Amino acid sequence: MTITLVDVACLLHTPIEGVILSHPKNVSQANGVELMVTHLGVTQVVAVKNCKDEYGAYVSYKMLKTYYEDHLDAATGLRDAQTLEEVQDRDRRRTACVKCYLLYLVGCLLFGDKSNKHIELIYLTTMDDYAGMRNYFGEG
């Protein structure tokens, strides 16, 4: 028994054709930084350092795990948020946490490379409609 792309589409609600499979081969470091800031919730300085260390628009699995854990800890600390700012920060952290996890899954299960050390950041562009996914699951 094996997992097919149709199974992936049904379970993860990710497209099996289109954007995720037809992306440019070479994504610039600047675009990688922008994707990390927008989707992974890291600062510009952290994103620039990451892309410099990875020699391009990639993130290592180790750093992805670190970002995930940081966002999870922060969101857990804001579980009983009182102010609007705290609620917004908690929601932003939760979203970034989920995107880190989904990117990890995409890298490990679907589009791993020979190095098995990092994943291309271009796959974050498929998560632009995360709000729509949250509505689909009844969370938003």
Image (spheres, helix red, strand yellow):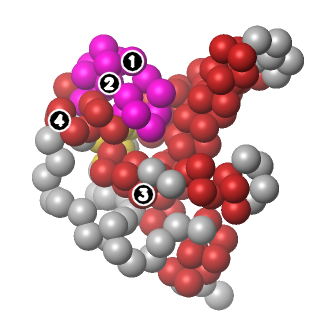
Instruction: Give the numbered dot on residue 14.
Output: none
Whether pointer 2 and pointer 1 mark residues with C-beta atoms closer than 8 Å, the reply is yes
Name the residue that disc number 4 marks: 29
Q: Residues within 10 Å of mark 3 (few under 14, many from 20)?
A: some
Instruction: Give the numbered dot on residue 43.
Output: 1
Amino acid beneath label 4: Gln
Mark 4 / mark 3, whichever is N-terminal? 4
Question: CA separation, marks 3 and 1?
Answer: 21 Å
Q: Tell whether position 42 is magenta.
A: yes
Q: Say which quarter of the image contains residue 24.
A: bottom left
Instruction: Give the numbered dot on residue 47.
Output: 2
**Which of the pair 114/127 is nearer the observer?**
127
Please identify the residue farthest to the front as the structure is shown. 84
Element type at mark 2: helix
Amino acid beneath label 1: Thr
| Picture residue at 50% right of the left edge, 63% below the top | 109
Mark 2 / mark 4, whichever is N-terminal? 4
Mark 1 / mark 4, whichever is N-terminal? 4
Residue 35 in picture, x, y percent from top left = 33, 38
| Picture residue at 62% right of the left edge, 57% below the top | 133
Secondary structure that dominates the magenta span = helix
Question: CA separation, marks 2 and 4?
Answer: 10 Å
- Work out whether residue 77 can be spotted: no
